[in-house]
Image (spheres, helix red, strand yellow):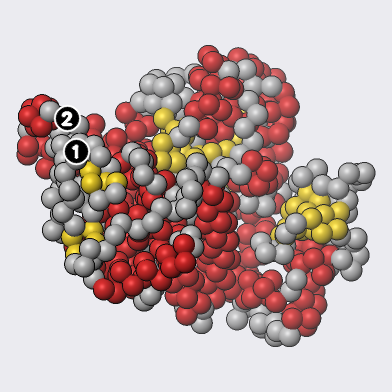
Amino acid sequence: MAITPQWKDELRARITLSTVIMRTEKLVKKGREWSACCPFHDEKTPSFYVNDQKQFYHCFGCGAHGDVISWMTEQRGLSFIDAIKELAAEAGMEVPAPDPVAARKAEKRAELVDVTTMAQDWFVHNLRSGEGREALSYLNNRGLKPEVLREFGFGYAPENKQALNNALPQFEDQMLVETGMRIKTDDGTTYDRFRGRVMLPIQDARGRVIAFGGRILGKRDGVAKYLNSPDTPLFDKGRTLYNLHRAAPASRQSGRVIVVEGYMDVVALAQAGFADAVAPLGTALTETQLELLWRMVEVPVLCFDGDAAGQKAAMRAVTRALPLLAPMRSLSIVQLPSGLDPDDLINENGPGAMEKLINEPLSLLDMLWNYERDAKSLTSPEAKAGLKARLMEHVDTIGDGDIRALYRRELLDRFSAFAYPPREARGNQLGQNQSGQFQGGRFQGGPWKGQNAVPRSLSKGAGDVLNRAMAGGQRATLLTAVIAGLVRHPQEISRHAEALSHLAKLDPNAAPAIESLIELSETLDSHATNAISEQQGYPAPPEDQRYAFLREGTSPGEAREELAEAVSLLAQKPALESAMAATIARFDDDPEGSFAEQARLRQQLTTVEERLKAFGRRKAGAPATQD
């Protein structure tokens, strides 16, 4: 059998990377990482970091990056198989017997990389020769700096059908065909694919040249402006992101990754100081490319042109992403001004304009709502019903149950506010704003001002939950505070019904109160603000000084916003824990995927726990009244 990715993942999981590196280098603990002066280049200030959780090392000075296997080959000088054998012995694993077929494929790929590397050197040479004068002038006129041309490896393919095989006679013509740089016709003749074009190398995650992209000079009828290599044994466009090998280390510093439409957009952004940009290669984002992005950051930023085509490209990415959404894993979208691409925007308004847009993106949900709302005229009831149907079709594709429920609730809320706006006549008839607060058993605002509240009956089990938490005047936990907040603001119960129902399944202690509240909420007048109490006159819960939704005088909007944040936080943790259990359970069937998913979920659990603590601390600093 071959040494599979799953086998290598298990090997990495059994070896602590920092322990291996500390055998030859002095590492210093820095938070969750280790640091040192880089062993790959001379430096006085440490820029070399080792992360055991993510199983890689990285130098921010020279860009050296790898895992425990690459450490053994690049720093220790071992061959790949010798490194594997040494690490396997340490980990107590057996090295799989070599697969002759896989070995031949690997050898073939290595040979083809030699071809593409030599071709790249030739393209670069051409750009500086007399033949490339027009191409170099074109690039200079676009404002590209010499250092950018060198960094990205710009070159030139001359207008000659036999130029490449004449320049690389050491390689058989069939090898040039297999790399995609030559085309073989039905009658057996071959000719160069790229002719009269500015050339850019397409590299894999390790920086090896695996394909090319070419931009035509001038305009030619029937000739594509941009041309990429076809899929080859080296290159699968649906599994490759342009500039990934540069953007990945940059994104670890910036905490983001920007996805643009084409490789010239990537180059323009890099010249303006945005080193964390990538692009698909002539196709809409695929599931594999989305997974590559999510390995770098939780919420990649999609940046598409402001025209209709850019809008459609953004929506294709959104619809492709919806089934794959998971807790703490989404997309955000930047929409450029109409008619501008990143290069145009930067040239006209400077890098600051792009930075501002990137820092204020639309959420995936906002993009989905805005696109469908604006897709068609909504002047009739039938058209509005069509909007709702389209939105729910999108929601139904979401794989994660909790996220699907939250999207459905949020989009239905937006649709209701849009399709059923408040009637001013009703407000005038009542003579005042319908919003009000329930204070001391009476409504202090709205059309029921001064009237006694009519309580709904809360079950004994629900009342007991609140009584135990409130006993002795102690402050409520977040869960109990949320239940108490829903007692005070029952009009919010239905909004969070699905998330609360899921929470009740995972927390038996909270189930009686949640189930009772959901049942009672169905009897509430949708236009009223009613308190809920026990039949015996269970009082509204005491105030908790931390939470606005439990303080008297809180506006409905503020209470609604804070309750939504609290419910979201409560729902996320058990959802992640449930996902972790499911991931662990499928380890035997999919060890590679399970390892990666467990690492991602652990990081997300840590983030949610920190957000829960921060939420409590933030609310503790809110204005308080005396107990």
- Circles 1 and 2 in contact, beta carbons < 8 Å: yes
For residue 195, say whether it is visible. Answer: no
**Residue 233 percent coordinates (x, y):** 54, 57
Across and down, in percent, residue 200 comes to 60, 35
For residue 546, which numbered disc appears in the image? none
| Mark 1 element type | loop
Rendered image: mark on residue 432: 2
Tell me the CA gap for discs 1 and 2.
10 Å
Identify the image quadrant of the N terminus.
bottom right
Q: Closer to the camera, 520 or 567? A: 520
Q: Residue at x 33, y 67 (%)?
A: 502
Q: Residues within 10 Å of mark 2 (few under 14, many from 20)?
A: some
Mark identifier at residue 449:
1
Residue 527 locus on image (x, y percent): 15, 44
Q: What is the x, y in percent for residue 601?
A: 53, 64
Q: Residue at x 73, y 27 (%)?
A: 147
- Which amino acid type is marked by label 2? Gln
Q: Earlier in the sequence, mark 1 or mark 2?
A: 2
- Occupied quadrant, residue 75: bottom right
Residue 30 seen in render: yes
Indicate the amino acid at tag 1.
Lys
State the image quarter where residue 219 is shown.
top left
Instruction: Give the side of residue 206 with respect to residue 234, left or right.
Output: right
Most foreground residue, 507 or 224:
507
Identify the secondary structure beneath mark 2: loop
Seen at 66% across and 47% down, the residue is: 252
The answer to whether 137 is drawn above or below residue 96 in the figure is above
Q: Nearer the viewer, residue 183 or 385?
A: 385
In the rendered image, the vertical position of residue 71 relative to residue 97, given as above or below: above
The residue mark sitting in front, 1 or 2, is 1
The answer to which of 617 and 230 lies nearer the viewer is 617
Residue at 37% x, 68% y: name it: 467
